[in-house]
Amino acid sequence: MRVLVLAGTSEARALIGEISGKHDIVASLAGVTREPIDLGCETRVGGFGGVDGLAEYLRAERIDAVVDGTHPFAAQMTWNGAEACKRVGVRHVILQRRGWKPKDGDDWRFVAQFEEVADIIPQSATVFLGTGRQTLDQFSGLTGRRLLCRVIDPPQRDFPFEGGKFVVGRPPFSVEEEVSFFKREKIDWLVVKNAGGERSSSKLDAARLLGLPVVMQKRPKRPGGVVVWSVKDCVAWLDA
Ligand code: NAP
């Protein structure tokens, strides 16, 4: 079976490792990371050109099934994938990781949009934005706070807000690393997307240990259809 894996997450990478040899795989990356990890299979990079472009690609490449292994916050791609598959009649599944839930001792405030953060985080706080550089401009309302934004690639622009800075690092980070980073930078608040998974939950463990409050962005709505919550279940869906 020819399978298109919409990638960009560790789950997509793990799935490709599991099914290579069994299926003919083509992985797709958005092209946002300058030096992505080699997925070990045929890989295309860059957008398809919306639903129309993806539908055309599915036809031209004779794709039998699409696994949407994108990040839970890559909502545009996920909606496009569902719509294009419906249009062309290709099997479609969303491989998603479970969201995080607060544990005893956590102080989490939930928001739908980052614009709401300015009403929650007090002036003069030092804020760790674990939300990536793509969303940085959405924090323009946080004037007065010192913002630190962690990015994978060295930034090619100056930090857009006064007094703030980029911090370069490629996950995963251990809890110890996060604790010492938060202490060193005197972080008071975290802003996090509910990405879920174990790979990046260490910042939440560190926040709990240090008693730091967290603003948690809720996940965007996803389309209906089949969703699997583990690589194992995704392999079984492909085999079925
Ligand atoms: P998005 O807003 O849902 O997608 C914007 C556009 O980027 C899509 O319409 C599509 O362009 C293109 N695109 C996205 N993922 C693609 C893929 N895997 N292959 C080909 N084109 C893709 O996505 P995003 O939030 O910018 O995320 C981009 C990528 O980074 C995703 O693959 C995602 O898995 C990964 N990622 C995202 C986050 C996050 O927090 N959003 C975190 C970690 C990793 P066309 O319409 O032209 O097809």
Image (cartoon, rainbow, N blue to C red):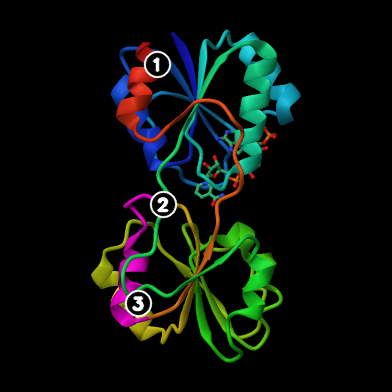
Q: Is residue 150 visible?
A: yes
> In the drawing, what numbered circle is on residue 238?
1
> Circle 1 sits in a helix, a strand or a loop, which is it?
helix
Q: How crowded is mark 3: few (under 14 residues within 10 Å), some or many (20 or more)?
A: some
> In the drawing, what numbered circle is on residue 181?
3
Q: Is residue 199 magenta?
A: yes
Q: Given this view, does label 3 or label 2 mark the residue nearer the observer?
A: 2
| Residues tagged 1 and 2 counted as in contact (Cβ below 8 A) | no
Image coordinates for residue 8, horizontal then vertical, percent: 48, 40
> In the drawing, what numbered circle is on residue 98?
none
Q: Which of marks 1 and 3 is nearer the N terminus?
A: 3
Quadrant location, the C terminus: top left
Residue type (three-letter) at the residue carrying disc 1? Leu
Which residue sits at x=31%, y=62%? 173
> Circle 2 sits in a helix, a strand or a loop, which is it?
loop
Residue type (three-letter) at the residue carrying disc 3? Phe
Instruction: Report the side of 159 relative to 99 (left or right).
Output: right
> Over which residues does the magenta segment extend?
196-211
- In this view, 166 is above or below 113: below
Image coordinates for residue 147, horizontal then vertical, percent: 56, 78
Compute the Cα span from label 1 to label 3. 42 Å
